[in-house]
Image (spheres, rainbow, N blue to C red):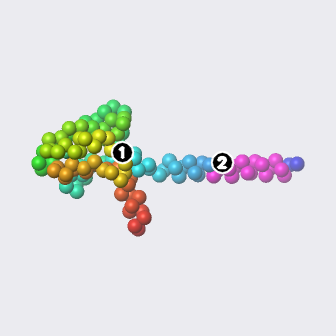
Amino acid sequence: MRDKKVRLVLAACVLLALLSGILTLFSLRPSPKDSVIITVDGEVIYEGSATETSPRRFTVNCADGENVVLIDEHGVKVESADCPDRACVKMGYLKSANLPIVCLPHRLVISFSGASDELDAVSQ
Ligand SMILES: [Zn+2]
């Protein structure tokens, strides 16, 4: 009778330990869509959170013009740009790790920074 109780307590402890271990693993592993990286001509000019509760706007100066990048609760997008095609503005919010926002005339690339980390892990 007592043995059974001890075994039950032990089983509960093991289960709890497993559960907390799994939870820790999940919380430690950053989701690829949590952080964003912005590069101009291959140079990193911003790396940080992909969402902001209070909208954040900043101007990226490129060789041939400038792009205004907006980060808000929905994500990251190019709000306005003075490039000829404005393809970067039309792309809207950054949605997929496989599809970065690119402004070809300004050599601006906005992508989720977690995506390249995963590729690195595979290639190493
Ligand atoms: Zn553009």
Q: Which mark is residue 95?
A: 1
Residue 115 in the magenta stretch? The answer is no
Q: Is mark 2 within 8 Å of ligand 1?
A: no
Percent x, y of residue 102: 24, 50
Q: Residue at x 17, y 49 (%)?
A: 106
Q: Is residue 25 left or right of residue 105?
A: right
**Amino acid tagged 2:** Leu
Query: Toward the viewer: 13 or 78?
Result: 78
Which label sits on residue 16? 2
Q: Position of residue 109 (x, y in %)?
A: 25, 51
Residue 85 versus residue 57 in the image, above or below: below
Q: Where ligand 1 lies, by quadrant?
A: top left
Q: Secondary structure at mark 2?
A: helix
State the image coordinates of residue 51 (x, y, percent, origin top left).
Answer: 36, 39
- The residue sitting at the right extreme is 1
* Vertical side of 100 occupied by 123: above or below: below
Stretch in magenta: 3-18
In the image, 42: left or right of 75?
left
Expressed as whole percent of the image width and height from the top left, the position of residue 119 reads 39, 61
Element at badge 1?
loop
Q: Is residue 47 above or below residue 124?
A: above
The amino acid type found where label 1 is placed reads Lys
Overall secondary structure of the magenta stretch? helix
Residue at image x 83%, y 50%? 4
Q: Residue furthest bottom?
A: 124
Q: Tell me the mark number nearer the camera, choosing from 1 and 2.
A: 1
Residue that appears at 50% across and 47% down: 27
Q: Is residue 58 visible?
A: no
